Image (tube, rainbow, N blue to C red):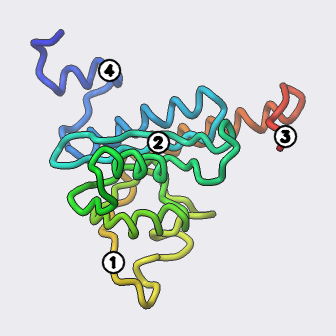
Amino acid sequence: MDNLPEYKLRQIKYGKDVPHKPDEKFMYMALEEAKKAFEIGESPVGAVIVRRGEVISAAYNTRETERNALHHAEIKAIDSACKKLNGWRLWECELYVTLEPCIMCSGAIMQARIPNLYFGAFDEKGGCIKSCIDINLVKGLNHKIKYTGGILEGECSKLLKEFFQRQRSLSNGGGLLRQD
């Protein structure tokens, strides 16, 4: 299998031929992180930070498991990247995340000086890059985030919908939801 071209390997792994685009390659990695969250009953959001084409950190939501409001995938990935690179400025990095970041994560992306953000699904209820507010339009902020949304949006949205359908079915007599 190692001798197969990359596109054939992707076809085998994902069950379809995926166009060769770097943003999709890293978004698929973020989706793998999101699936880890799904498997442990967390909201399935995954994040990957890339520097010069190399993944330097990857994370998924653990807010419920760790009982910590800060444990969003983006925050955990940023924290790990800062430790790995021994500094808080991630200006040579790109962030790939399966869901449009919330206000907390958008602020952390700005504070870490991550210049490029790529996300999958738009979040009409809490997204703060484009959907609810556009953080780049907030007056007085001296850093802007360049972003591309909708990368593998169908796959990212599908995983989120499956998770919340499962949660609703569990709350309707099929089992117990986490009660905090």
Whole-percent x and y of residue 119? 40, 54
* Distance from Cα at disc 3 to Cα at disc 4: 36 Å
At x 28%, y 17%, the residue is: 12
Residue under circle 4? 13
* Distance from Cα at disc 2 to Cα at disc 3: 23 Å
Counting residues from the N terminus, which is met first, the one under dot 1 or under dot 3?
1
Q: Is residue 177 left or right of residue 25?
A: right
Q: Is residue 129 left or right of residue 164?
A: left
Q: Residue furthest right?
A: 173
At x 26%, y 40%, the residue is: 55
User: Between residues 49 and 111, which one lies in front from this camera angle?
Assistant: 111
User: Between residues 41 and 124, which one lies in front from this camera angle?
Assistant: 41
Counting residues from the N terminus, which is met first, the one under dot 2 or under dot 4?
4
- Secondary structure type for disc 3: loop
State which quarter of the image contains the N terminus. Answer: top left
Question: Which residue type does callout 2 highlight?
Answer: Gly
Whole-percent x and y of residue 87? 30, 57
Give the image quarter of residue 21.
Answer: top left
Residue under circle 3? 179
Q: Is residue 6 left or right of residue 140?
A: left
- Secondary structure type for disc 4: helix
Residue under circle 1? 143
Residue under circle 2? 46
Graded by Cα atoms within 10 Å as few (under 14), some (14 to 19) or many (20 or more), the crowding at tag 3 reads few
* Distance from Cα at disc 1 to Cα at disc 4: 38 Å
Of the two numbered discs 2 and 4 in the rendering, the one whose residue sits closer to the viewer: 2
